[in-house]
Amino acid sequence: MPGTFEPLPGGGAAVALDDVEISIIRSLAVQLLELIGPGPAEDTPDDPLAELFAEGPSEPPADPVLRRLFPDAYSDPEGTPQAKEAEEQRAYSAEFRRYTENDLRSGKRDNALAVVRSLDSLSTDSAGEGGAVLKLSVPESQQWLGALNDLRLAIGSRLEIADEDDTDLLYRLPDEDPRKPMVMAYLWLGGLQETLVATLMP
């Protein structure tokens, strides 16, 4: 089971992680939380209705990683649209973003927090010498799946991975390439994600 999720009887998943792996995943999840930022309720703690009625941003984020995590809802995948069509797509995307991005950020924040908390619980409750076995319920597995996907999107954006051909090139990077550690993390998280998906399939 080292490095791969396996199904638990009755649902959920388990994976054996060593101390280094625990530290890496936790660090990446914390960095993702910092990138996503605080929620509206954290900005206005005295107003419990603020988050409910808060409007999100209408423009795409400046950071390319955040643009990957929160892409425009309306765009032309086939190529460059005509000027009028492009303007309409921008308007539709801005409206959609205004009313959905806060919820999307909240969901991604909750998933990353679930990862951090489950790993922290591991280290205080059951981590022994050299690591521990992480056991997740079905809801926790789904949160981990979302967080792993977001982490891979973030790392993939930093590595400028656009399609499968780019991924193939990563395998051929020389060891001295400064991107190599990030590439190894990207591929490793992909393996975890793939095996976790398999545990959730009926």
Image (cartoon, rainbow, N blue to C red):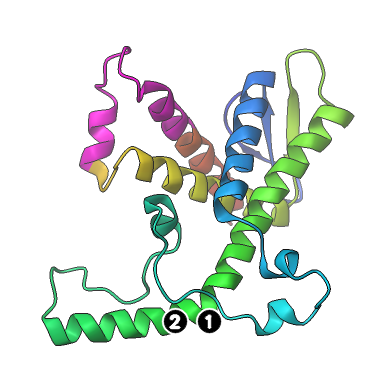
Q: What element carries label 2?
A: helix
Q: Which residue shows up at 54% across the image and 45% down it?
A: 148
Q: Give above or below for 67 relative to 75.
A: above
Residue bearing mark 1: 99
Query: How far from the left and from the top, in percent, is residue 57?
Result: 49, 74
Quadrant for the C terminus in the image? bottom right
Q: Which residue shows up at 39% across the image and 80% down it?
A: 94
Q: Quadrant of residue 48?
A: bottom right
Query: How far from the left and from the top, in percent, is residue 30?
Result: 64, 41
Magenta segment: 165-188
Q: Which residue shows up at 76% across the image and 50% down it?
A: 10
Q: In this view, does 39 lie to the left or right of 66?
A: right
Residue 96 tag number:
2
Decide: marks 2, 1 in contact (CB < 8 A)?
A: yes
Residue 169 is one of the magenta-drawn residues:
yes
- Binning the other alpha carbons within 10 Å of mark 1 as few (below 14), some (14 to 19) or many (20 upward) gives some
Q: Which residue shows up at 72% across the image and 79% down it?
A: 50
Q: What residue type is labelled 2?
A: Phe
Q: What residue type is labelled 1?
A: Tyr
In terms of secondary structure, what is the magenta stretch mainly? helix
Q: Give above or below for 128 relative to 154.
A: above
Q: Can residue 1 be seen in this view?
A: no
Q: What element carries label 1?
A: helix
